[in-house]
């Protein structure tokens, strides 16, 4: 069923007006960064639909009490008003004074699921109940925070396309204890979110030409000082080291390297990727990085405006993946609905 373009544009205008109103209301609030504390100027409260219904019922009860001059009806009406007033105080206090910290977001590959976590701290010695954190239309499960303790709240978002992202505005809210009032606050916590390219196997055209470090190896091989031997082909080996005669005999790819092993390193080169568009090349390089790390290779990476020097290990792998995620990409606001930019 096709969406109505008129209603879609109207919804967009309403959302823009809502965002403008929220920005105007929160214009005095500084950006939170990695942590925030909720003071009185940051907690807002209004009746829920059930609260407005209760107000209407109380007005009718008050008019009936006045009309019939019934003391018991007055008593019941004012008793319910007093309960509602206490509920307003408890609902507002359920948020007041809380501390919220954003936790590091583990990088993911494009198309995976992001797990966003926050830590809620209660410093004042009273427990907090039924707290919900939402980003856009996605909300976490309600959580409770014990007195002078902390708890974690998590929600999942679909990972967008490759790049560097920031979280959009967050909303922490509660309807404790009666559900007739809702207190909320807006947060601008901003953990770094990295989305790596989804790896694509480039096939047999893998790796780039060896760098200057391979030249001494070639000279020693010609002089006979370091004999060569054949080993099975590994993903990322440059095509220039493939022994095609061995492939013709056995049907399996082998590469030539020196016995000393000094030539067993590899450069992953942007120019050697068999693709024309940027994102596919980055996805192929991502596959190369993961394969080289899995085999314990010493490898480096060449991009058009950056060179990652030779290295190995988990830290080097993460450095290469970060370079791929950040390649010509400025930080953007994450879409919680998962539309892929």
Image (cartoon, grey):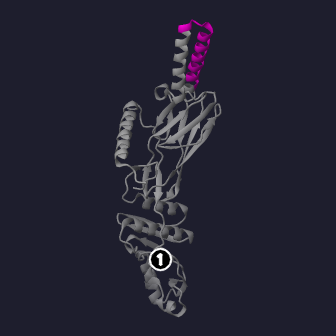
Image: 4 above or below 127: below
Q: Residues within 10 Å of mark 1 (few under 14, many from 20)?
A: few
In front: 142, or 270? 142
- Which residue appears at 51% of the width and 55% of the height? 107
Residue 15 magenta-highlighted = no
Residue 261: percent from the left, percent from the top?
A: 53, 79
In which quadrant of the rendered view does residue 84 lie? Answer: top right
Magenta: main secondary structure equals: helix
Answer whether residue 96 is visible to the viewer in this image.
Answer: no
Which residue in the protein does label 1 denote? 203
Please state, as top left, top right, bottom left or bottom right, where the N terminus lies in the image: bottom left
Where residue 281 sits: x, y (%)?
A: 40, 68
Magenta span contains residue 67? yes
Query: Going 62% across and 32% down the picture, which residue do you hit?
Result: 129
Which residue appears farthest toward the bottom when viewing the image?
249
- Give residue 194's position: percent from left, percent from top: 47, 54
Q: Which span of residues is magenta-colored?
A: 66-90
Q: Quadrant of the C terminus?
A: bottom left
């Amino acid at each position: 069923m096709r969406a109505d373009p008129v209603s879609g544009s109207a919804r967009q205008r309403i959302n823009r007006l809502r965002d403008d109103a929220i920005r105007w209301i929160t214009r005095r609030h500084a950006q939170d960064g990695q942590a925030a504390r909720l003071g009185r100027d940051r907690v807002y409260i209004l009746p829920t639909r059930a609260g407005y219904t209760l107000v209407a019922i109380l007005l009718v009860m008050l008019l009936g009490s006045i009309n019939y001059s019934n003391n018991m009806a007055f008593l019941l009406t004012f008793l319910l008003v007093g309960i509602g007033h206490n509920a307003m105080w408890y609902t507002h206090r359920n948020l007041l004074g809380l501390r919220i910290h954003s936790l590091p977001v583990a990088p993911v590959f494009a198309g995976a699921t992001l797990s966003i976590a926050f830590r809620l701290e209660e410093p004042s010695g009273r427990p907090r109940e039924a707290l919900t954190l939402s980003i856009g239309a996605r909300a976490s499960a309600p959580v409770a925070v014990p007195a002078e303790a902390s708890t974690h709240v998590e929600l999942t978002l679909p990972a967008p396309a490759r790049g560097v992202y920031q979280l959009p505005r967050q909303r922490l809210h509660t309807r404790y204890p009666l559900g007739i009032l809702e207190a909320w606050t807006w947060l601008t916590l901003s953990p770094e979110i990295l989305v790596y390219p989804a790896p694509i196997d480039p096939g047999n055209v893998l790796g780039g030409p060896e760098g200057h470090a391979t030249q001494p190896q070639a000279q020693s091989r010609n002089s006979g000082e370091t004999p060569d031997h054949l080993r099975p082909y590994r993903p990322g080996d440059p095509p220039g080291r493939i022994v095609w005669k061995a492939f013709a005999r056995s049907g399996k790819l082998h590469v030539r390297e020196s016995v000393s092993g000094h030539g067993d390193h590899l450069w992953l080169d942007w120019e050697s990727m068999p693709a024309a568009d940027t994102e596919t090349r980055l996805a192929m390089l991502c596959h190369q990085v993961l394969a080289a790390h899995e085999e314990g290779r010493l490898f480096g990476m060449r991009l058009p405006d950056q060179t990652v020097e030779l290295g190995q290990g988990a830290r080097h792998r993460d450095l290469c993946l970060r370079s791929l995620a950040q390649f010509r990409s400025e930080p953007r606001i994450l879409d919680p609905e998962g539309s892929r930019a």
